[in-house]
Image (spheres, rainbow, N blue to C red):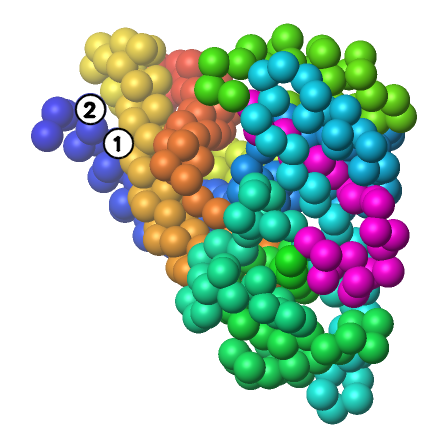
Amino acid sequence: MPLIVLLASRNLFHDRVRLVTTVIGIVFSVILVTVQIGLYLGFERMVTTMVDHADADLWIVPKGTRNFEDPSLLDDRQRFRALSIAGVADVAPLVLGFAEWRRPDGGSTPVFVVGSDPRSGGIAPWNLVEGSVDALAAPFAVAVDRTYFSRLGVTGLGDTGEMRDQKARIVAVTSGIRSFTTTPYVFAAFDRARGYMGTPADRATYFLVRLATDADVTGVRDRIRANIADAEVLTTAEFRERSRSFWLFGTGAGAALFGGALLGIVVGTVIVAQTLYSSTKDHIAEFATLRAIGSSTRYIVEVILWQALLSAVVGFLLATAVGVAIVIATADSALPVVMTPGLVLGLLVLTVLMCAVSAIAAIREVVRIDPATVLGR
């Protein structure tokens, strides 16, 4: 081990109590940042999960639509106008909205119904653990996520509920399709979904456009826009970004999560800075001795930085282990914490930078040391 690293490690591990304080500060900061950013990533995925799983190149949406869960209605005539455009292979209607689910025990709960024809494009339930998508073609058939069994008062396949006095029988069960609003999703065939919500027969919420293989997306979109009124035509990426921006920034949720992450960084930096500064003050005589025997300021500064780096590594490893445990614990919750390789790498860089910045106060103290103080002792 290089002498400079050995000196830094012994200086760091000599006072175990101070080391524990430093590591706790780093772990607390990194975990807080991990949870806040992980919640942000989980929230970001959940608000666009339906858009991400839709079979569409373009979306025809009512004017002013802010996000996927902002249902207004379009006229069926707009679908036929879009179908007349060169380059359009198919236009699938999608209907969605809120309904009241009446449980077998007599209680009720609001649900969000998603209706489309999976065979002609749309949004089919995914992550199936029981049943099949084809079974949705049966009368009164629906698919729900097992996360919401207790909310819906059911236990599995074959159980029933009611919406608008019409029976709803579970023929497919999914896992992990959760709504960030905690309102259960209920998938149904297009016509059946309209019946559950009382939507007029000539209306739909969105039209999902699929293009021919060699079609130019921009050109087709511009032609559809010119051919329809009172509607917008968005690419999947545009609609995804619009939904994400509304829920994360239009509602302030994203700012709150980032604010919590920033607070974690500030708290961790202050704790580590205070600890490193106190450690340097307690060992000021030793640093002065190094200066007296000819060590350069740069050498001593490197010792302090290595001390900060070692603190960062220990704290990061412990925080990562705790973060993984949190991810596992929240995997089936309403809003799971998500950890990606990019987030882990970013947290490592952030931890090192945080500890390096924290070392500035200690470095300033060392730079002002007068080697002659050793002779006075």
- The reply, left or right, for residue 182 in relation to residue 165 is left
Residue 41 visible at all: no
Question: In the image, residue 362 lies at what x, y percent?
Answer: 45, 26
Q: Is residue 228 above or below residue 30?
A: above
Asked if residue 166 lies in the magenta stretch, the reply is no
Give the residue pinned by disc 1: 8
Question: In the image, residue 152 lies at what x, y percent?
Answer: 68, 77
How far apart, in angstroms, are the residues tagged by discs 1 and 2?
A: 6 Å
- The reply, left or right, for residue 325 in relation to residue 126 is left
**At x 60% / y 31%, what residue is drawn?**
90
Asked if residue 202 lies in the magenta stretch, the reply is yes
Q: Which residues are magenta?
A: 190-211
**At x 52% / y 21%, what residue is drawn?**
212
Q: Nearer the viewer, residue 289 or 340?
A: 340
Quadrant location, the N terminus: top left
Q: Quadrant of residue 287?
A: top left
Question: In the image, residue 63 lies at what x, y percent?
Answer: 86, 28
Q: Is residue 293 above or below residue 356?
A: above
Q: Nearer the viewer, residue 322 or 365?
A: 322
Q: Of helix, strand and loop, which one carries label 1?
A: helix
Give the residue pinned by disc 2: 4
The reply to whether callout 1 and callout 2 are in contact (CB within 8 Å) is: yes
Q: Of helix, strand and loop, which one carries label 2?
A: helix
Q: Amino acid at mark 1?
A: Ala
Q: Amino acid at mark 2?
A: Ile
Residue 225 visible at all: yes
